[in-house]
């Protein structure tokens, strides 16, 4: 099972049901070295599923006193691919270490 840290819309029950067909269970954790920004969503499917035109987006700060709270979920590889499909091009999936020491995937601002 893959571990995915969510700090935004993937924590919403309606988004989970639309993308995975089930409600995810997870545990609270936090991600050091990042801050949260905002990105405008124009993808019709994502707007419909999330109900939000602006989504949070992780931006690497490198400062370990910066910390983002969220939830770490366990997903199958197929579900992780579905999460990739949900996220718009402003995001990229990268690996990270949470405050708890868990290695996981995160969706952060794509490098341009």
Image (cartoon, rainbow, N blue to C red):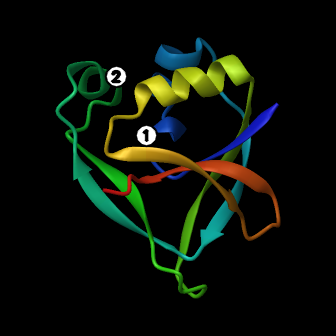
* Residue 29 position by quadrant: bottom right
Q: Does the image show residue 23?
A: no
Q: Is residue 43 left or right of residue 72?
A: left
Spot occupied by residue 32 in the image (x, y as percentages of width and height): 61, 74
Q: Is residue 84 left or right of residue 99?
A: left
Q: Which image quadrant: the N terminus? A: top right
* Residue 38 position by quadrant: bottom left
Q: Is residue 112 left or right of residue 87?
A: left
Q: CA distance from mark 2 to mark 1?
A: 9 Å
How many numbered marks does the figure carry? 2
54 in relation to 88, above or below: below
Residue at (46, 46) in percent of width and height = 92
5 in relation to 38, above or below: above
Q: Which residue is tagged 1?
A: 9
Front residue of this view, candidates 102 and 18: 102
* Residue 96 position by quadrant: bottom right
Spot occupied by residue 27 in the image (x, y as percentages of width and height): 74, 49
29 in relation to 32, above or below: above
Front residue of this view, candidates 15 and 112: 112
Q: Which residue is tagged 2?
A: 49
Q: Residue furthest top?
A: 21
Residue at (24, 28) in percent of width and height = 47
Q: Which image quadrant: the C terminus? A: bottom left
Spot occupied by residue 11 in the image (x, y as percentages of width and height): 53, 40
Q: Report crowding for label 2: few under 14, some 14 to 19, many 20 or more residues within 10 A (C-alpha).
A: some
Q: Report crowding for label 1: few under 14, some 14 to 19, many 20 or more residues within 10 A (C-alpha).
A: some
Spot occupied by residue 104 in the image (x, y as percentages of width and height): 72, 50
Give yes or no for contact between labels 2 and 1 (Cβ–Cβ under 8 Å): yes
Residue at (82, 66) in percent of width and height = 101
């Amino acid at each position: 099972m893959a571990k995915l840290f969510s700090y935004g819309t993937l924590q919403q029950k309606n988004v989970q049901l639309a993308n995975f067909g089930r409600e995810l269970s997870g545990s609270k954790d936090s991600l050091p070295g990042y801050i949260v920004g905002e990105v405008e969503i124009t993808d019709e499917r994502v707007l419909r599923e999330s109900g939000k035109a602006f989504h949070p987006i992780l931006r690497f700060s490198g400062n370990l006193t910066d910390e983002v709270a969220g939830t770490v979920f366990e997903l199958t590889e197929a579900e992780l691919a579905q999460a990739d499909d949900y996220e718009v091009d402003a995001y990229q999936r990268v690996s990270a270490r949470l405050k708890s020491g868990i290695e996981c995937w995160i969706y952060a601002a794509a490098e341009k």
